[in-house]
């Protein structure tokens, strides 16, 4: 049975979201938020609307990695969904390269980057599993 996945490139003010209804992540949107609870409320809405089965959150090293892990744990408790953690190292660099190759203007790159980074996080998850 095919599972539906939600990929998340967590940020403290902006979070990229990607969807997968197969084995490829597709950029979906960027969510702006004031805090984690507001963000989780928005994500739970997407989970219900898109019938998401599992969530993949990108994590990095250091202080930000700790915040990403805390967010993932809170999301798991609030959503009741299985949450996977995936190394997001260099996903932003890859996303910027993709944006430049796609001819995105500087203005359009900002939204594209966060959502595209989330799709790369999903694809890494699929590659490892």
Image (cartoon, rainbow, N blue to C red):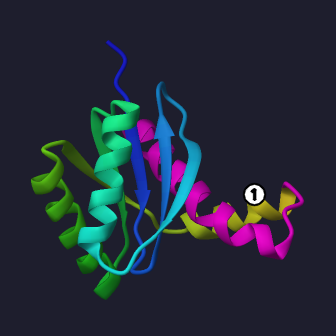
Q: Residue furthest top?
A: 1
Q: Residue furthest right?
A: 103
Q: Give 69 or 40, whichever is nearer the viewer.
A: 40
Could you tell whether 30 is left or right of 75 in the image? right
Residue 32: percent from the left, percent from the top? Answer: 48, 71
On whether residue 117 falls in the magenta region, the answer is yes
Residue 5: percent from the left, percent from the top? Answer: 38, 37
Q: Give 129 or 29, whichever is nearer the viewer.
A: 29
What number of labels is visible? 1
Q: Is residue 104 above or below residue 126?
A: below
Q: Mark 1: which secondary structure?
A: helix
Q: Is residue 67 above or below residue 71?
A: below
Provide the major secondary structure of the magenta segment. Answer: helix
User: Which residue sits at x=37%, y=29%?
Assistant: 4
Could you tell whether 34 is left or right of 102 in the image? left
User: Which residue sits at x=24%, y=79%?
Assistant: 66
Residue 44: percent from the left, percent from the top? Answer: 28, 49
User: Which residue sits at x=34%, y=78%?
Assistant: 61
On whether residue 29 falls in the magenta region, the answer is no
Say which quadrant the C terminus sits in. Answer: top left
- The region drawn magenta spans 102-128
Q: Is residue 2 above or below residue 100?
A: above
Q: Is residue 51 above or below residue 72?
A: above
For residue 18, say whether it is visible: yes
Q: Residues within 10 Å of mark 1 (few under 14, many from 20)?
A: some
Identify the residue under disc 1. 98
User: Which residue sits at x=30%, y=79%?
Assistant: 35
For residue 129, say whether it is visible: no
Say which quadrant the N terminus sits in. Answer: top left
């Amino acid at each position: 049975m095919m599972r539906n996945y939600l990929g998340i490139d967590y940020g403290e003010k902006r979070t990229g979201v990607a969807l997968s209804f197969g084995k490829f992540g597709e950029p979906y949107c960027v969510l702006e938020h004031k805090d984690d609870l507001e963000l989780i409320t928005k994500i739970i809405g997407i989970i219900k609307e898109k019938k998401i089965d599992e969530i993949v959150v990108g994590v990095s090293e250091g202080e930000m990695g700790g915040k990403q892990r805390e967010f993932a744990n809170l999301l798991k408790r609030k959503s009741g969904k299985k949450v996977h953690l995936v190394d997001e190292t260099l996903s932003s660099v890859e996303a910027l390269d993709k944006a430049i190759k796609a001819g995105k203007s500087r203005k359009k790159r900002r939204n594209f980057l966060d959502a595209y980074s989330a799709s790369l996080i999903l694809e890494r998850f699929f590659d490892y599993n």
